[in-house]
Structures are given as C-alpha cells and as structure tokens.
Amino acid sequence: ETGVTQTPRHLVMGMTNKKSLKCEQHLGHNAMYWYKQSAKKPLELMFVYNFKEQTENNSVPSRFSPECPNSSHLFLHLHTLQPEDSALYLCASSQGGNTVRETQYFGPGTRLLVL
Amino acid sequence: AQKITQTQPGMFVQEKEAVTLDCTYDTSDQSYGLFWYKQPSSGEMIFLIYQGSYDEQNATEGRYSLNFQKARKSANLVISASQLGDSAMYFCAMRQAGTALIFGKGTTLSVSS
C-alpha cells in the first residue's frame, strides 16, 4: 500500500451506534490530520497530531474522539452522532516540520451517513 | 486571521482551452505557503502545485501554473490545454508556519468535448 489509506470508504450508522474511522499513512510522516467536508462548506480542520501528540482541536464536539497510537495510524471514534455529522471525513499526513512549505497528502476519505 | 476566498462556484471550459481559477487570500503573516488541490468525484484531495510567499517566480507543474500576485493577495491557478479528466473540484489552500492548511470553498470545473 502506498500513500494514505482510509477505511471504511463508506459508513452508515444510527445515532446510537459507536464506530471508528481508520487512517494509515505509508509516507514516513510525523503529522496527521482529520478534516470534515460537508456539502457546500469549506473543509473544516478537526484535529492535528504531531509526533503522536494532539496539537490542535478545533472546537470539535466530544462525540468525535481522535486517537493516534503511532505516527502511522490515526483513528476517529464516533458515538451518538447527529444527522448533521453526515459528511466526507478526510485524513491527511505531512512531514511534521511545521514549515509553510509542508504539503499535506490526503486519503480517499470516508463518506459517513448518520440516520 | 487567515482566510481563503474562491469566488467562482463553477467554471466551464472546452477541451484544449486554458482556464483560470481564482483565489484570493488574507493573512497578516509575511511567510506563508499557497497550495492548490484537485478533488475528483471519488473524494481524494490531490496536491497540484505550491507557491511560497517569498518565491519570486510563479510556480509551474506541467499543465498547471500559479499566477501569484502578492500585492493583490491573489494566487490564481491556470490550467493549460484542458482535458476531460480535469473535471473536478479545485481548492485553494494556505498554510502559515505551525498551522494546518485552511481551504477555500472550492470551484467546480467542467471540461466538455
């Protein structure tokens, strides 16, 4: 596998379910990100991890819980979601040097539908 | 606060023509990076091109070039010789030191034969 992979690609869940999204990067990067993309809205940054430490939480509701066990893996745990949480969830990774030149590489995303 | 504005919700172009996608940005930092990404209907964001705020030359990558006008705070993407496979959403993004990318709302490009 190369680049950034995300599983599952599609997910339908009820509001009382608990599920997890998984992201894995094979680029040797040290920073990982979760973004939310809703229809007709810009991508919203949710969480940033740098060398496994969470460095940014963009006022995300507690029903979204990130986990970064190592620099290659990032999870987003979901529980008691709302229908408005339905969106494309994109994972990205980057070198982790915090320079302006740093390019983020994205996975294919997980399309989430909350019923 | 940093901000990216893309004012064109949709653009239409014929194959082999050139097209310009607009992007303006707002930042008080002197050092920043500007990026363009392509998002096909499959959903993956594909990195296209990068321009640094201190770069004197406009960036080019194959058929993509970036028309960087620092005084106007604009970073327009030019796609030359459009192809059917260029049909997608295009996002302009900016990064300041120590921050993640922030994105504009995107422009949908439709290329017809």
Image (cartoon, coloured by chain):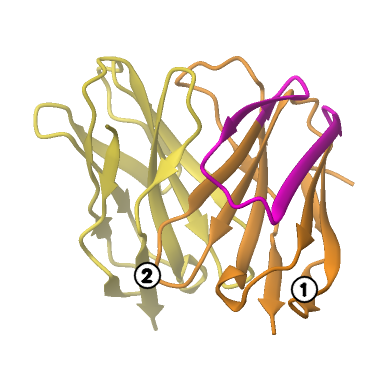
Chain colours: A orange, B yellow
Q: Chain of mark 2?
A: B
Q: Does residue B92 lie above or below B20 as drawn?
A: above
Q: Position of residue A90 (x, y in %)?
A: 64, 54
Q: Which mark is residue B108?
A: 2
Looking at the rendering, the stretch of residues picked out in magenta corresponds to: A49-72
User: Disc 2 on helix, strand or loop?
Assistant: strand
Q: Residue at x 41, y 49 (%)?
A: B63
Residue that mark 1 sits on: A10
Front one among B24 and B13: B24
Which quarter shows the C terminus of chain B? bottom left
- Above or below A88: residue A76: above
Q: Nearer the viewer, mark 1 or mark 2?
A: 1
Q: Position of residue A99 (x, y in %)?
A: 50, 16
Q: Residue at x 23, y 65 (%)?
A: B8
Residue kind at label 1, given as amino acid type: His
SS of the residue under disc 1: strand
